[in-house]
Amino acid sequence: MLLDTGDENKEKTIHVIAIVFLIAAGLIYSLSFFGYFPVPNSDFPAFLDTGQRWLHFQIPNSMKRAPVFSIITALSGLPFSRPDRYLIGSELYNALLLPAVMILIYMVCRKINLRGAVWIALAAGASPWMVRLSSEPLAELTLIAFFAAAVVCVRENIKLAYLFAALASISRWDMAGLLPAVALADLVQNRKWGRTIILSIAASMPFILCMIITSVQLKGQTGGSHYLQVLEQDRTFELAEDLRLYWKGIMSFLNVELLQKQPSGEQESFKTMNSVIFWITASVLLAAFLTGAVFSFIRRQWEIIVMLITAAPYVFIHAMYPYRLPRFCVPVQWVGLLVAVYGIEIVRRKFFDGNKRKLLITLLSITGTAVFILWALKMGDTFINVRKYCPAIGITTVSVCLIALASFIVMEIIRRSAPSGRWLLLPAFLILATVSSGANIGRAMGNGKSDANFKKLAEWFLDNAKEDDKLMTTMAGFMPIFTGLPAERFLHTGSIPVEDADDFIEFIEKCSEEGVTIIAWDSRIPSADRYYKLWGLDRIKVLSAPVYGTKVDTIDRCSLVHMFTEGKPKIAIYRIMPEDYFMLFED
């Protein structure tokens, strides 16, 4: 149905308001938590090192980290002059990328004609780990940006879709499924075999070259931490566990873990209610998703087909990966939400479109409004509890809720909408969505201090180390970032292979040979973790003794000089003395 000029102008104005709202909401979420983690994810130094090597036209020693985000990381610090400039730069990049990602998801929603596209984009962008990753220097938001941009371009500008697919595939290897998805959409829509083959080869070449380099580097290696090595050695298949994580991310705007008070006054998880909510919402989500997926193929909705073809191998690859992490779900969980909403839209148009069943629609709107408000109130206890350790979530949630309600009212006034159940239902939904998302975001963010003691370790080294001291720690990559000192003064604990030193005495001797004078034991990696074994951390387990109550000043040649026992992780710092040091005192 064609719009007249007046209606067209109204829709353009509403479109602008929607984009302005998403920019404001995205920045409120991301900037509220900018710099929230004193020590962010431990993968960051690897991205930085990889990016700097590519910028110097060097092939990295490991192709575990893909080039695009790594190069962005290395470039992002250039405007700053402080020692941690790359960390600040990459965190700022992700903070600004969150509203951009929300706008791209909104554009995808418009492409597939979803009603309330702006609110769907808000629900997707305000998922807890989407917000957390806007304050972490990691690649997931970049993956979503290229993925969503390719989907937006898949009909009108297929060449750009190939470009975004190529960039996604070398931003992280698990997004390579976007390449054949775009090629299939191009072939079926345009039926130009020659062009499709040429563009597919051109778009795939960067990924193929990276895989060739990877295969050469890994040839003959056993063990190791590359994704392919991990999949080869510790492969698993826990799809059900992963799907539960996807459910948590997708439904975060509706579901938060409810609490109940005990007679003692303490609050604990309301397990029965939470289990009931899970099975109800998971069943509805699955039914809606399957409906949307089936009808997308029937109706040749190529945007959704491309999303599904890309997401399917991604989900299955991560089901085989031995680590179940919520952040791994983020690059494709928004696809699950959009496809489910598309399925619901199919049902709505079939049974509730037009003027039929007006009374039923009104009754459902009133009932839905009451349920949403009561549900939001029930979540209040959880939200208040979360604010105790994540205070920033309070003002953040209120701010987003207020501008969402204001934007809704303005858009409805511009549309000159007649009073209807929509005026009750949507504001109630927005209140529920922001409260639920807020509580879930607060839980995902925590207090931000989980690895803060490593920054204290860097500060301690800067204040106490001698000019020729070298420090060994499991977070060696962050030490030059925080201290501004050369990277050569910091060695990773796993840099001495187990085959070169399989016990504590040999390990300390190797440390001396490498010029290491200070060694820091920390409690960050549990003994059951794969990296604990890979790095041979059992060799220095003896250094944990004073942290756990054993009174000791020296362990072999290691003299205890300082400890961090408050906060996480616990750290014990030792100076490695020369072999003849204690013999001098004995004489």
Image (cartoon, rainbow, N blue to C red):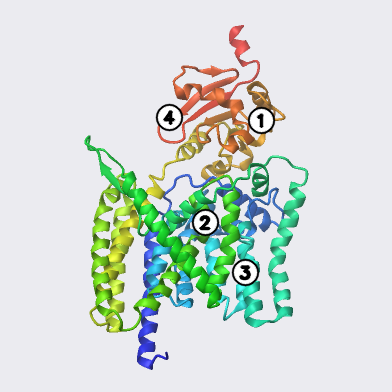
Q: Quadrant of the C terminus?
A: top right
Task: Name the residue at the bottom extreme.
Answer: 4
Residue 127 can be seen in this image: no
Residue 478: give x, y in percent of width and height. 55, 43
As displayed, is residue 108 above or below residue 482?
below
Q: CA distance from mark 3 to mark 1?
A: 52 Å
CA distance for labels 4 and 1: 27 Å
- Name the residue located 55 percent from the left edge and 77 percent from the top edge: 300
* Mark 1, residue position: 515
Q: Hey, what amino acid is under mark 4?
A: Thr
Q: Secondary structure at mark 4?
A: loop
Q: Are marks 4 and 2 in contact (CB under 8 Å)?
A: no
**Residue 28 at x, y = what percent?**
37, 61
Residue located at (54% from left, 18% from top):
554
Q: Which mark is residue 565?
A: 4
The Cα atoms of the two marked residues, 4 and 2, are separated by 30 Å
Looking at the image, tell me whether mark 3 or mark 1 is earlier in sequence order.
Answer: 3
Q: Is residue 308 above or below residue 40?
A: below
Tag of residue 181: 3
Q: Earlier in the sequence, mark 4 or mark 2?
A: 2
